[in-house]
């Protein structure tokens, strides 16, 4: 794998993602804030006010797990499914780079844009807390989790979506189903995790597991036939 | 003289289900040669191109490019190929310059990359559109960009699938001149097209394909020479009427295939398929028409193409 090719491919995905889906960035940031704010309503009856306040304060730590895969699903759907339909994957796969480079370029391009969405969501959630008169901004001690560990953990979810889009061929249904599953599954995951205190060892395990998932997915892509990835119809 | 082989296909075969897409196809392309690959839809042109791009596994035979096996050594071959596909396959949200720069970066263009990109933009006549996104280009300009992308890294072999399909006359001419120039500089070109006139003008070697089989191959001159003349020009000693000629040629040429010119002193006649032009002369003389000159019309690549395809069909129906 050549770094110069990979950076060129990541740059391409970022430029295309910003131009084609710039409106999605604030929209998904707002939606993420709304999803995070939902426990205020749903858990109010079952949790004590103290537990609820604790949950709401902890949620930003897990915000990357919700915001990043959700946004990435929209980016990857266009970057893989739509590009395949338009034939754009073909030249990339023939002489743009190896399939693994092309795929990883898309994953890391989507990751970069999703990171931006995550930062916007974080700011939005802190602003929402301020509006309620509460401090929902993550504590300084939690920043390494929010800005590094959880985004890396989210990378595995992004990679798995990209793998699904890569091997599923021309499936329009997939482009609709995956974001919905990610949105609701992510919201549930965040609420579930938000009730537990985050630990350094837990974060380390999540980071390592995520790296392993990305590496395994890359190997699957490297072995997947180029002609299928390019969407060529074999008679 | 045989030039150094850039592409060598030896009895390559591929079947998709019940369809034999390629049936023991053999051909070679030398350095700086433009090879025209023609045939009806479904004859195996695109499958051949895909095989050369390592996108189709062959059931049998051997396909080598630059002396390397396409399937097992494609990673070494790919960077030296350029391809234009039957659809533009561009990235709609990248500008002309960004598209060319991306591929120049991916393929490691020798020398100054920016200068090379500028040169290609200039060569493709896209200077005024360098900052325009691909999705806003007209079909002709998009095809120019697709060509530019294919040559930005100065490939040794260019593969073109229907490159002139649906483009304007100006772009057509521009691309034709560009291909000639590239071939002079040593780039080998594999060209599939339904535009036989274009292939005749450009190609130094032509392969005619039908239902996955090579039915004829050679230089355009050889193929045209092989084909029986598709028509004759006849000059008469005294004026004849259309009715006399039609009556003389009943069963040999239809009314729509006979044109009477010069006040009845001349006629251009296209006999029905399978009838030799000599039969026209025999019938006219037998009918008492006084023939002064009998000149078989020079056959075109289109005549050769249909003659070979007709020949195959006729042999199979026997």
Image: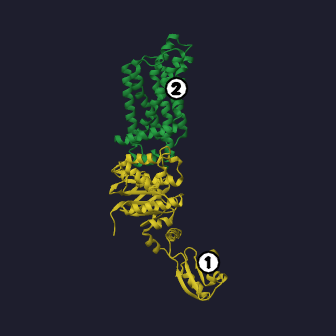
Chain colours: A green, B yellow
Compared with B279, B162 (above or below) is above
Q: Percent x, y for residue B88?
A: 49, 51
Mark 1 and mark 2 residues within 8 Å of each other at the beta carbon:
no
Chain under numbered label 1: B
- Alpha carbons under labels 1 and 2: distance apart: 77 Å
Q: Percent x, y for residue A79?
A: 48, 40
Q: Residue at x 45, y 39 (%)?
A: A13
Query: Does residue B280 appear left or right of residue A163 in this picture?
Result: right
Residue at the spot of label 1: B259
Q: Quadrant of residue A153?
A: top left
Residue farthest front in this picture: B128
Residue B53 - label: none
Q: Nearer the viewer, residue B209 or B20?
A: B209
Q: Secondary structure at mark 1?
A: strand
Q: Are marks 1 and 2 on the same chain?
A: no
What is the crowding at mark 1: few (fewer than 14 residues within 10 Å), some, or many (at least 20)?
A: some
Compared with B314, B261 (above or below) is below
Q: Nearer the viewer, residue A189 or A77?
A: A77
What is the crowding at mark 2: few (fewer than 14 residues within 10 Å), some, or many (at least 20)?
A: many
Q: Percent x, y for residue B228?
A: 50, 76
Which of the image's four quarters has the N terminus of chain B? bottom left
Q: Nearer the viewer, residue B48 or A1?
A: A1
Q: Percent x, y for residue A24?
A: 53, 33
- Is there any visible trace of residue B211 in the rendered image? no
- Is there any visible trace of residue A92 in the rendered image? yes
Q: Quadrant of residue B33?
A: bottom left
Residue at the spot of label 2: A32
Query: Does residue B131 appear left or right of residue B5 in this picture?
Result: right
Query: Does residue B113 appear left or right of residue A230 in this picture?
Result: left
Q: Secondary structure at mark 2?
A: helix
Chain under numbered label 2: A
Compared with A162, B174 (above or below) is below
């Amino acid at each position: 794998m050549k770094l110069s090719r990979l950076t060129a491919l990541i740059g391409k995905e970022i430029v295309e993602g910003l131009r084609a889906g710039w409106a999605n960035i604030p929209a998904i940031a707002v939606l993420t804030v709304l999803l995070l704010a939902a426990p205020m309503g749903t858990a109010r009856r079952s949790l004590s006010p103290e537990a609820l306040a604790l949950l709401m304060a902890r949620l930003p730590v897990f915000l990357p797990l919700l915001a990043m895969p959700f946004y990435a699903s929209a980016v990857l759907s266009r970057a893989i499914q739509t590009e395949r339909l338009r034939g754009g994957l073909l030249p990339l796969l023939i002489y743009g780079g190896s399939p693994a480079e092309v795929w990883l370029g898309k994953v890391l391009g989507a990751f970069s844009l999703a990171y931006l969405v995550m930062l916007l969501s974080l700011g939005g959630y802190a602003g929402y807390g301020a509006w309620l008169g509460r401090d929902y901004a993550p504590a300084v001690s939690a920043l390494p989790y929010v800005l590094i560990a959880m985004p890396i953990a989210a990378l595995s979810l992004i990679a798995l979506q990209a793998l699904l889009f890569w091997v599923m061929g021309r499936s329009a249904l997939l482009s609709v189903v995956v974001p919905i599953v990610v949105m609701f599954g992510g919201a549930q995951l965040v609420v579930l995790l938000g009730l537990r205190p985050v630990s350094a060892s837990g974060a380390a395990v999540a980071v390592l597991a995520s790296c392993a998932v990305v590496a395994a997915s890359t190997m699957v892509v490297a072995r997947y036939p180029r002609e299928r990835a390019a969407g060529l119809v074999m008679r | 003289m045989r030039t150094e082989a850039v592409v060598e296909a030896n009895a390559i075969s591929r079947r998709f289900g019940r369809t034999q897409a390629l049936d023991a196809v053999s051909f070679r392309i030398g350095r700086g040669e433009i090879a025209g690959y023609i045939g009806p839809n479904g004859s195996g042109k695109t499958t051949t191109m895909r095989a050369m791009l390592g996108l189709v596994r062959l059931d049998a035979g051997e396909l080598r490019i630059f002396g390397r096996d396409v399937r097992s050594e494609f990673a070494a071959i790919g960077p030296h190929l350029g391809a234009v596909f039957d659809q533009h396959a561009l990235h709609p949200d990248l500008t002309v310059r960004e598209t060319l720069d991306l591929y120049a970066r991916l393929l490691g263009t020798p020398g100054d990359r920016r200068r090379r990109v500028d040169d290609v933009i200039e060569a493709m006549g896209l200077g005024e559109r360098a900052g325009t996104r691909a999705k806003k280009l007209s079909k002709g300009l998009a095809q120019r960009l697709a060509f530019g992308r294919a040559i930005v890294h100065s490939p040794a072999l260019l593969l073109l699938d229907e490159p002139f399909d649906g483009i304007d006359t100006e772009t057509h001419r521009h691309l034709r001149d560009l291909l000639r120039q590239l071939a002079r500089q040593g780039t080998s070109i594999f060209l599939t097209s339904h535009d036989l006139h274009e292939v005749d003008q450009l190609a130094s070697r032509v392969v005619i394909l039908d239902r996955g089989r090579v039915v004829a191959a050679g230089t355009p001159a050889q193929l045209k020479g092989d084909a029986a003349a598709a028509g004759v020009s006849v000059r008469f000693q005294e004026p004849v009427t259309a009715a006399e000629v039609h009556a003389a040629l009943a069963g040999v040429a239809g009314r729509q295939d006979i044109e009477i010119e010069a006040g009845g002193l001349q006629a251009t006649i296209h006999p029905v398929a399978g009838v030799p032009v000599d039969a026209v002369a025999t019938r006219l003389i037998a009918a008492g028409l006084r023939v002064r000159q009998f000149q078989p019309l020079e056959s075109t690549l289109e005549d050769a193409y249909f003659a070979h395809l007709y020949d195959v069909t006729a042999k199979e129906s026997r």
